[in-house]
Image (cartoon, rainbow, N blue to C red):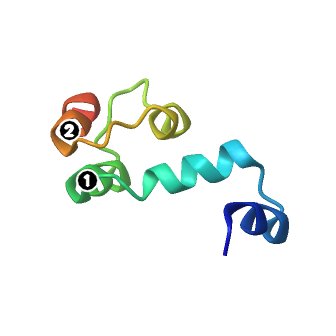
Amino acid sequence: MTLAKLMEQGGIKGPYLMELINLTFLAPNSLEGILQGNVPLDFDIHKVARKLPLSWSEQRRILA
């Protein structure tokens, strides 16, 4: 299925779909930390999803 078809069928806007896709690349321990609330006070999941580095070590540095 194409991204365009996903957006059409799900009623999802392009930028939001890309955020969701980017979040699938979170390091497992980073995701666990987010779910447990172990994030900086100014944490914003949307900002993280838009600028998420693929390097897990860089993700850990950002989310520490």
Identify whether 64 is placed above or below 55.
above
Label for residue 60?
2
Q: Residues within 10 Å of mark 1 (few under 14, many from 20)?
A: some
* Position in image of residue 55 (x %, y %): 23, 41
37 or 49, which is in the foreground?
49
User: How many numbered discs?
Assistant: 2
Amino acid type for the residue under numbered disc 1? Ala
Identify whether 2 is placed above or below 55.
below
* Position in image of residue 41 (x %, y %): 38, 26
Q: Residues within 10 Å of mark 2 (few under 14, many from 20)?
A: some
* Position in image of residue 39 (x %, y %): 32, 37
Q: With 3 as the anchor, is 20 left or right in this view?
A: left
Q: With 63 as the anchor, is 51 left or right in this view?
A: right
At mark 2, the secondary structure is helix
Identify whether 53 is placed above or below 28.
above
Q: Earlier in the sequence, mark 1 or mark 2?
A: 1
Amino acid type for the residue under numbered disc 2? Arg
Q: With 22 as the anchor, is 60 left or right in this view?
A: left
Task: Kindly check if marks 1 and 2 are in contact, taking CB atoms under 8 A apart as contact.
Answer: yes
Label for residue 17?
none
* Position in image of residue 48 (x %, y %): 45, 35
Q: CA distance from mark 1 to mark 2?
A: 8 Å
Q: With 55 as the anchor, is 35 left or right in this view?
A: right
Badge 1 is on which residue? 27
23 or 1, which is in the foreground?
1
Q: Residue at x 28, y 34 (%)?
A: 63
